[in-house]
Amino acid sequence: MTPAGRSPESLSLPEVEALAREAHAAQRDKAGRPYAEHLRAVAEGVRRRGGDADQIAAAWLHDSVEDDVLSERWLADAPLSRRTKDIVLALTKRAGEPPEAYAERILATPGARLVKEADLAHNADPARLAVLDATTRARLTAKYATMRALLGLGETPVP
C-alpha cells in the first residue's frame, strides 16, 4: 500500500475521471448538457467539502452502475479501493427501492453521505433547474429536498 492507502495498481484520480468521461460520453443530463459536466461538478463538490481520493473517485463513478454505463461486475473487478466500490454501490439506486432504504444504505456506508451531498447540491442548483419545465423542476426539487432530509443534510444545499 502507498502512504495514501491506495495500492500501487489502483487507478489514479485522472484515470478514474477519464474512464467516467468515456463511459458517460453519449449521455446527456435532463437539460441536454453532457453528463460528464455533472460528474465533474460532483467530484469538485466532494473535493471542496474535504473529501478524500476514495470519495472523489466514487463521485466520478457514482452513477455509472445505475446508468448501466459500467456493470456491477466491472466495478467488482476494477482496480479501485474497497471503500470507493462500497460508496458507488451505496449510491446506486435499485429498482423499486423506497427513498428511506436508499438513504439508510448511504448513511451506513462510510464516506457515501458526503458524495451524495455533493450530488444533491449540484442536482438542486437553481441555475441547473431553471432550464427545466415547471412540472419537472417542482418534482425534482421535492425529490431532492426529501433525500436531503432523510440524510440529515438540512434544507439548503451548498454548491
Image (cartoon, rainbow, N blue to C red):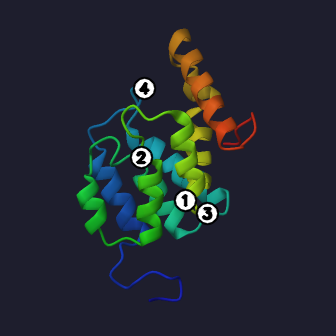
Question: Residue 36, located in which quarter of the rendered image?
Answer: top left
For numbered disc 2, what is the local secondary structure? Answer: loop
For numbered disc 1, what is the local secondary structure? Answer: loop
From the top left corner, tell me how far across and down residue 70 is, in percent. 27, 51
- Between the residue at mark 4 and the residue at mark 3, the CA separation in whole angstroms equals 27 Å
Question: Residue 119, located in which quarter of the rendered image?
Answer: top right
For discs 1 and 3, the disc positioned in front in the rendered view:
1
Residue under the image location 45 percent in, 47 percent down: 39
Q: Nearer the viewer, residue 69 or 43?
A: 69
Establish if 17 lies above or below 125: below
From the top left corner, tell me how far across and down residue 19 is, in percent. 31, 58
Residue under the image location 24 percent in, 60 percent down: 74
- Between the residue at mark 4 and the residue at mark 1, the CA separation in whole angstroms equals 28 Å
Q: Residues within 10 Å of mark 1 (few under 14, many from 20)?
A: some
Label number found at residue 51: 3
Going from N to C along the chain, the mark reached first, 4 or 1, is 4
- Between the residue at mark 2 and the residue at mark 1, the CA separation in whole angstroms equals 12 Å
For discs 2 and 4, the disc positioned in front in the rendered view:
2
Residue annotated with mark 4: 30
Q: Amino acid at mark 1?
A: Thr
For numbered disc 4, what is the local secondary structure? Answer: loop
Residue under the image location 55 percent in, 18 percent down: 139
Going from N to C along the chain, the mark reached first, 4 or 3, is 4
Tag 4 near tag 1, CB within 8 Å: no
Q: Amino acid at mark 4?
A: Lys
Label number found at residue 72: none
For discs 4 and 1, the disc positioned in front in the rendered view:
1
From the top left corner, tell me how far across and down residue 145 is, in percent. 65, 30
Quarter occupied by the C terminus: top right
